[in-house]
Image (cartoon, rainbow, N blue to C red):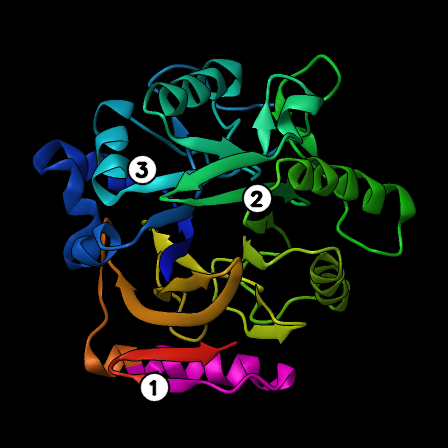
Amino acid sequence: MQWLGFTGDVMLGRMVNEAASERAPSDVWGDVLPHLQALDGLFVNLECCLSTRGTPWTDTHRQFHYRADPEWAIPALEAAGVSWANLANNHVLDFEQPGFEDTLDHLDDAGMAHSGAGETEQAAREPALVSVGDLDVAVVSVTDTASDYAASEDEPGVAYARLDVEQDDQRELVGESLRRAKDLDPDLLVASLHWGQRMVVNPPAHHERFGRWLVEQGVDLVHGHSSHVLHGVEHAGGAPILYDTGNFVDDFAPNRGLRNDLSFLFVAGVADGDVQRLELHPVKLTEDAVQEASEKQAQTARDLVRERSETYGTQFDRDGEALVVEF
C-alpha cells in the first residue's frame, strides 16, 4: 500500500514569511515534518504566490494578498516532500502577473507538479499527472471562488467553474478536464476543489451533489478546501469526499467557536488503484507553523469532524491519535 497525504491551505505569506528569516525553511512544518517525509506523496493547496515581485491585485476590493519568498518557501516545500500543489484558488494572482509567473516558474524549476492555473484557460484546465513511486495520480483542479482570477483564451489565471451539476455548461467544463485526466491512464484520479464560502462548517447542498457526481464520473478522491474550517467526510461509492480539509499552515486569528486552528493531515492508503484506508492525523496551527495536536486538541478535532460527518453516516475508528475509515 502507498500512502498519499492531503492537506488544506498552505499559506506561507505574511507572518509565516516573516518568521522564515529567523529559522530553517523546514521549521514551518514543526514536529509534523517526519510524518510528512514518511509519506509516498504529499498533495497541498498552495494558498499564496511564490515571488518577491508584483503589486497587489487592485481590480477588486481584496482585503488579503499573500506571497512568500521562494528562496525559503521552495526549500520548505521540498523538505516536506510536496509532490503537487493546487493553484486553482483565490490567491495565486494576488500579486498580478509577475507574481503568478514566478510561482509557476519556481514550482517548475523545483520539479513540483501543479494544476489549476496557467497562461491560458486551456493550460489552467489541464490535469496534472504525478508519479508517486509506481503509482500515477492524475489531478484535476477547479475553483468557484475566484471569478476575477479566471483564465481566458489569451489571459493567465485559474480554472474557474460554477460547481453545480444542474448547470450543463459548467458540468461540461469540468467533465472535459476529467476526460483529459482519464486519457492519461492514471492509477488514481483526484479532483481538488477550492470551493465555497469562508468560515462555514458545512458545505452547501449543491457542492454535496457535485462531489457525488465527481465520484460517479470515476474520481477516486475529492480533495476540498477554501472555508478555512474542517468539514465532514463522506464515503460515497467507495471514494472519500473530503468536503473541506481546513487549514494546515497560516497566520489567521483562531476562531474559538469554529476552531479553524485545528485540522488534520489526511492520509489515503492506496492499493490496486483504490483508496482502501483513510487516516486523519490531528494537527494544531500556530501563527507561523503547524504542530502535532496535544491530547486535548486532538480530541476536540476528532469530535468536530465526527459531528460534521454524521449527516453522511461516516463511521470512524481510532488508531492511536488518528481517526480511520476503511473502504
Within-10-Å neighbours for mark 1: few <14, some 14–19, many 20+: few
Depth check, front residue: 158 or 261: 158
Q: CA distance from mark 1 to mark 3?
A: 36 Å
Quadrant housing residue 321 = bottom left
* 259 relative to 170 in the view: left or right: left
Q: Secondary structure at mark 1?
A: strand
129 within the magenta span: no
Q: Position of residue 46 (x, y in %)?
A: 43, 40
Within-10-Å neighbours for mark 2: few <14, some 14–19, many 20+: some
Residue 130 in sight here: yes
* Residue that badge 2 annotates: 186
Q: Secondary structure at mark 3?
A: helix
* 180 relative to 127 in the view: left or right: right
Quadrant housing residue 196 = bottom right
Q: Secondary structure at mark 2?
A: loop
* Residue that badge 1 annotates: 318
User: What's the magenta region?
Assistant: 299-317
Say what amino acid the circle numbered 3 marks: Arg
